[in-house]
Image (cartoon, rainbow, N blue to C red):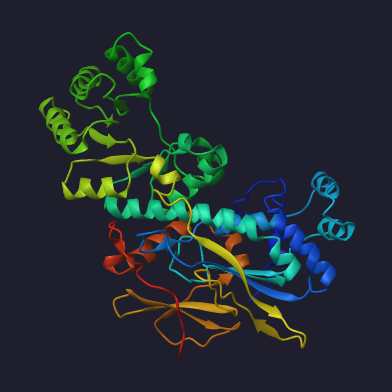
Amino acid sequence: MVSAENRLEEFAGPQVGDSSTAFLTDKYEITMLQAALRAGNAHQKAVFELFARRLPKGRRYGVVGGVNRAVAAVRNFRFTSEQLALLSEDPLIGEDTIEYLRNYRFRGRIYGYPEGEVFFPLSPVLTVEASFADAVLLETVLLSILNYDSAVMAAASRMVNAANGIPLIEMGARRANEAAAVYASRAAYIAGFTVTSLLEAGLRYGIPTTGTSAHSFTLAFADEREAFRAQVAALGTDTTLLVDTYGIERGIRNAVEVAGPGLGGIRIDSGNFREEVPRARALLDELGAKHTRIVLSSDIDEYTLAEMNAAALPVDAVGAGTRVVTGSGAPTAEMVYKLVSREGDNGRMVPVHKNSEGKASRGGRKIAYRTYDGDGTITAERFGYGEHHELSGGVQELLVDGDFFASESLDTARRRHARTVASLPKSALSVHPGEPAFTAQEDDA
């Protein structure tokens, strides 16, 4: 495997930004660094692993999101003069620590599950090999990125599965802070959403964008038909008209009257979908608009989508927002970052682990792999120990070197996710709460 050190210097993929990410750090990482420097073990080799002890309640699989962004964050993890000046004012922080931070550059190696891969409890999603000092500083920034992106990606993946082929529009920017909104769009696209409403996500990541109008546009005119005429004049008859400002039936009649039977689509943002969608389809057909699409929105999640499919509602596209950016009620992926191996006095690596009740960890650097049956369905998630592990046929090694993440496109990750989800057992794709499809198990071979 190749060291990620030089590759991080040349990173040209998705980035957190040109500004420093070093202060995306909890203070105790700085105080731990200082204590280790003074104790003399700061420069000893160490291995940290990022994993989830459990999945959010009821989830059957997780999805790895944000790895490419995390590697970019490590690239930008350098302390500025302003940051160092602030730390220097803290009576707890000594000059030796400031000097170490002044020269900080990550000098280790990173391995991880590729973006869009699924994971299960105890899967070693990310491995950081470096000195204790170099690796301990990365805890908060790595967890903040992977926990959020993975939560959004898992929620979006469940929605895509429940939609069963219905195109999904990500439109959650107004329900998240401005930075998280962009990363949520990115995660949802990798998970299978078709487009986003957020222009910054389109600019930064090349995700297709879409959008027409809100209720405020209709209310800005004295009459609904006048508003529809203005939109059609500006955007053409293939536009999608929002028809529920004053009542769905009235809105549909006005929309077809203005745009004609060639109207591209209508959007319904309220009401009981089970009742309103069949009525809307019947009315559109009656008015001759047999090819006009029906788009739904308004707090839609995987459960709503599953209900739509069960009822065979004639829906052509769905916009989802709040439930995407909040991880559909599970805003974290439950990931933690723990030391699993350290350099001993004899220079050899020593496994270490926690025994804390409910928070135990497993010591030792791990190599993760997955087994499949003859039909290509996942049968187990397993791990062995060390830097190398002998693998036989019908298995997939999961951890790849950090330099891989620098060159990967979103579409590559998107295709990987679709392939991986297709290989899950059918029971894992149920939206109903259940136990994880697998838990990563130690190889007893």
| Vertical position of residue 327 compared to residue 2: above or below | above
Residue plotted at (51% across, 45% down): 206
Residue 11 seen in render:
no
In this rendering, position of residue 370 left or right of residue 404:
left
Between 431 and 64, the residue placed more toward the observer is 431
Give the total number of marks visible in the rendering.
0
Image x and y of residue 217, in percent: 38, 18
**In the rendering, at what x and y percent does residue 266 appear?**
26, 29
Most extreme residue toward the front is 357
Above or below, comparing residue 236 to residue 296 in the picture: above
In this picture, residue 74 sits left or right of residue 305: right
> Looking at the image, is 201 positioned above or below residue 149?
above
Left or right side of 126 for 242: left
Left or right placement of residue 317 versus residue 325 in this view: left
- Residue at 68%, 54% in the rendered image: 26
Which quarter of the figure has residue 361? bottom right
Please determine whether, in this image, residue 117 is positioned above or below residue 330. Answer: below
Residue 306: horizontal and vertical position, in percent? Answer: 24, 50
Q: Residue 303 location, x and y as percent?
A: 28, 49
> Where is the N terminus found, in terms of image quarters?
bottom right
Q: Residue at x 50, y 39 (%)?
A: 176
Quadrant in the picture for residue 438:
bottom left
